[in-house]
Image (spheres, helix red, strand yellow):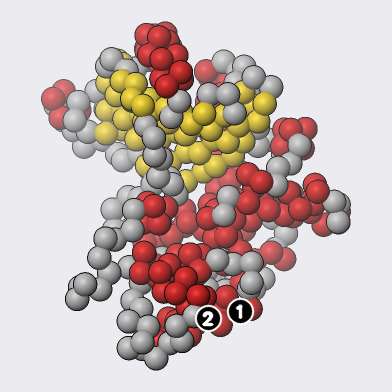
Amino acid sequence: MLIEIGATLSPANFALAEALAKLGVPLTETNMIEGQSILARLPDVSPAVFALSKALDLPPTPAIMRALSGVLDRSSMTNRLDIGTLDLLSLLPHSGHDANSLSLYIRNLFDKLGQSTENKLLTDPDTANTLKVYDIRSSLLELAATNTGGQTALAADKHASYIEGQQLLNQVSVDRTESSGPLYFAFPILLASREAACEVQLWPAKDQKSRTAEDADKEEYLHATIRVDSERLGVIETTLIGFWSGRLNCTLYAAKPTTVRLLKRESSSLAKALGALGWSVAPITVVKKDRFVALWLGGELLDNPRVRVDQRI
């Protein structure tokens, strides 16, 4: 295909073509030339980031490339703010909270992560970072500016890009999908006095349409996937599907065999805790899972690329 469109057979072009093909973006001369130009001007941006912007119909401006890089490269995971700063920014839910307090905390956190300047990226990407908005991302950018040259500044800057990317993908999910698409949030939490990564894929709730008890037991009220990656327990993923009847399906996935055994042993306690919150909980299923696909919009495309791109092969 590269030969057909007259592109040079270089390692850089092969990488760009592979990234475009994985996401089903047409391998045209126009896309290759645009990608070469963008990647030449932004050397820290990977071909996958450019391909993702094209797959999601986002203009590949520097601001959007940086935002998508924050999510795709998981920058905030390698450049971490200290626990005290994260707590000050209200980004750090503590495991010791009771259920109601934790629920309120996380709901407020979602609101904060959802009310930032990222909605300006599509309409006015060049001035998005100059807007004065009091939110978590703006606070991080101010922290980056006041601690110039230090590790805190670098971590704050990377974390701001990560939040910016989440919001940009959420906006695409809301604006682009014909049916309701999932929203994505990621933030640190505190488990056993250590920071752990938490990701949430949340499907917007729909209004109840069921009129009978039988229909209410088939119609979803809640659909969420929560993934926690801790140093000691490894990756634990929880899928919650709640129905208007009050019934709740809960499935737990874990990567480590020891964690699977622990979750199976404690599953009845978890069922009781969910029941105390008003849910009619079906038996909780615990499954070992070796591979976890990305939860954010587009992540599954990158993790599960199309098998065949060129139909002639």
Instruction: Tell me if 29 is positioned left or right of 106 in this view.
Output: left
Q: Residue at x 31, y 20 (%)?
A: 285
Instruction: Tell me if 212 is positioned left or right of 33 in this view.
Output: left
Residue type at mark 2: give it.
Gln
Q: Which mark is residue 40?
A: 1
Residue type at mark 1: give it.
Ala
How far across and down, in percent of the image, does residue 38 sit?
56, 78
| Image quarter of residue 225 | top left
Check disc 2: other Cα within 10 Å, few if <14, some if 14-19, many if 20+.
some
Residue 95 or 154: which is nearer the viewer? 154
Would residue 44 be visible to someone looking at this image?
A: yes
Q: Residue at x 32, y 18 (%)?
A: 284
Mark 2 and mark 1 residues within 8 Å of each other at the beta carbon = yes
Instruction: Tell me if 188 is positioned left or right of 2 in this view.
Output: right
Q: Residue at x 34, y 21 (%)?
A: 286
Residue underneath mark 2: 36
| Image quarter of residue 243 | top left
How far across and down, in percent of the image, does residue 23 sit?
36, 64
